[in-house]
Image: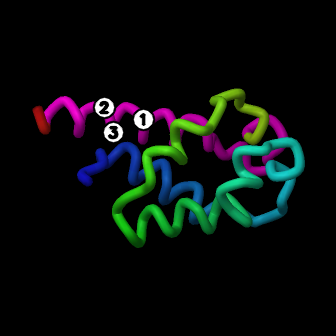
Amino acid sequence: MKFSRHTKALAKNIVENCTECGRCMPNCPFLQAYCQSPKQLFQKFLDDGDIDPEIPYSCLLCSHCTRVCPQQLKLDEAFYSMRKDLIKIVVSDR
């Protein structure tokens, strides 16, 4: 799949700045289900160049992760960007 530069830049920012402190994990069933840390999840996305669509669509986009993150990383913004890219991919395949 082809993801936008914007989505890749958001993912790269998370990988480069996530300290894996774990503050985002305890109150997020989504993150608990899909990763050990956001850094690992986004690193896999960057390495593979792809992601199971279920993952970005499982995020509630509630911004709790950003509120508790000492780095103020916007995971919800990255997942929302992935969603937009996935829609563009589906539409362009028609």
Residue at (48, 59) in percent of width and height: 12
Residue at (59, 56) in percent of width and height: 14
Question: What is the C-alpha distance between the residues marked 1 and 2?
Answer: 6 Å
Q: Quadrant of the N terminus?
A: bottom left
The location of residue 90, given as percent across then percent down, is 23, 35
- Mark 2 burial class by Cα count in 10 Å: few <14, some 14-19, many 20+: few
Task: Quickly name the residue at label 1.
Answer: 83
The location of residue 53, given as percent across then percent down, is 43, 45
**Type of the residue with mark 2:** Ile
| Part of the protein shown in magenta | 66-92
Q: Are discs 2 and 3 less than 8 Å apart at CB?
A: yes
Secondary structure type for disc 2: helix
User: Magenta includes 57?
Assistant: no
In the image, is residue 51 above or below residue 55? below
| Front-lying residue, 70 or 46 | 46
Secondary structure type for disc 1: helix
Residue at (88, 50) in percent of width and height: 26
Secondary structure type for disc 3: helix
Q: Quadrant of residue 65?
A: top right
Q: Main secondary structure of the magenta part?
A: helix
**Type of the residue with mark 1:** Arg
| Front-lying residue, 5 or 44 | 44
The location of residue 46, given as percent across then percent down, is 42, 65
Task: Quickly name the residue at label 3.
Answer: 86
Label placed on residue 87: 2
The location of residue 67, given as percent across then percent down, is 80, 35
Q: Is residue 65 left or right of residue 73?
A: right
Q: Are discs 3 and 1 less than 8 Å apart at CB?
A: yes
In the image, is residue 15 above or below residue 93? below
